[in-house]
Amino acid sequence: MYIILVYDVGEKRVGKMLKLCRRYLSWIQNSVLEGELTEVQLKQLKAEAKDIMHKGDSLIIFSSRNERWLEKEVIGEEKASTDQFL
Amino acid sequence: MKKTFYLFNPGRLSRKDNTLKFVPVDEKGKEGPARYLPVETVGQLFVFGSLDTNSALYNFLGKQQISVHFFDYYEHYTGSFYPKEYLQAGKMLVCQTLHYADPYKRQRIARKLVDGAAFNMLRNLKYYQSRGKALEQQIEGITLLQQSIPMTDDIPMLMGIEGNIRQIYYTAFDEILNDFSMGGRSRQPPKNEVNALISFGNMLCYTACLDQIYHTQLNPTISFLHEPGTRRFSLALDLAEIFKPLLVDRTIFKLLNKKVLQAKDFDDQLNRVILKEAGKKKLVEAWEERLKETIKHRALKKSVSYKHLIKLECHKVAKHVMDMQGYEPFKAWW
């Protein structure tokens, strides 16, 4: 499953949320990450995220079956690439 | 499916916030922007550039069951960081060893491996024959040798036949490839472009097999066709035989004939040819795509990627040594 994750959490929890998400997904922009996950991995990520979140925080997950069904266009500077070559 | 990451740039890989952080370093020693690798989705790492790490990282990788494979400047495989086996099975080890120790049982598997490899090589040749290449001679030669496989009664003889098959097979390369010629196999060092590609591709195939073996209960050091212990993880060499024609050779034919790889992607040095950085990336990219490609599996009745096919092969060997189901090698049926 291909995931795009966007979070908006209180200032105190931003760092925590970023650290968590970076374990599962590739960072592409402030508060935005993307990557391929299995259903179980996504469940784990959600469960761990819920532990961090407080009232008023939000986390949005866009998912599609495959990266193929997703068109991505970057305008301006690409902050981080997600390929597997470093 | 977990991803493989290829580290071409030199840099420092470290554990940070319970995930992996890679900081590339350029020739002047200047650090670039850090990149975080999502540890939960990393399957293995291939290291081509020089990598700076510490033991804390390896402890972490070990815990996450991520193996690291190292290659030297000339693209030779130098070794792996192989995390502690997590699927321990004494019974499997005993069965595997018994199958190795009994000459009759060992040859049964070894013959099947050579047979599968020969079949898949023929598959390649027939494919290109149907596209108008003159390969009758090679096909005939290999078919003849393939028929003599059941008659062998020791491993060296079998290895001899396997060698002869490969020799004939490689003569077909000159016919299949449009702009490049191979002129026989040369290794250590590879003497021309095609040989350089084969060496590099075989290495990728070997590590892919090793990685799949890691995720089964088989022991990678006890092999059947190759002599165990003499070289590297020899069970991976055994399995790679079957998949090399399908995965490596076909990828090479495609890249060269479609002119994705060209003469400028190679570095012509004294007495040896190696791939340049850009060339390596192109090959690895095509390789990754090939592993992800799926086929409709007849017995399982579902789509299976080539990568998973290697794992299924491991399971078949495992079932064979446990005396659950006789081993039949994977033969490309399309």
Image (tube, coloured by chain):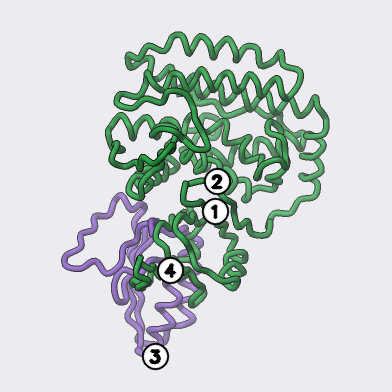
Amino acid type, callout 2 = Thr
Q: Earlier in the sequence, mark 1 or mark 4?
A: 4
Q: Are marks 1 and 2 on the same chain?
A: yes
Disc 3: host chain: A
For this rendering, which residue is in front, B204 or A70?
Answer: B204
Amino acid type, callout 4 = Phe
Amino acid type, callout 3 = Lys
Q: Residue at x 50, y 64 (%)?
A: B40
For this rendering, which residue is in front, B309 or B190?
Answer: B190
Q: Position of residue B64 (x, y in %)?
A: 58, 64
Q: Nearer the viewer, mark 3 or mark 1?
A: 1
Q: What residue is shown with label 1?
A: B69
Cβ–Cβ below 8 Å for labels 3 and 4? no
User: Cα distance, mark 1 to mark 2?
Assistant: 7 Å
Check the image and name the residue furthest to the bottom.
Answer: A12
Q: Report the disc number at residue B10.
A: none
Q: What residue is shown with label 2?
A: B207
User: Cα distance, mark 1 to mark 4?
Assistant: 16 Å
Shade of chain A as shown in the rendered figure = purple
Shade of chain B as shown in the rendered figure = green
Side (left or right) of A23 relative to B32: right
Cβ–Cβ below 8 Å for labels 1 and 4? no
Crowding near the residue tagged with mark 4, few <14, some 14–19, many ≥20 C-alpha atoms within 10 Å = many
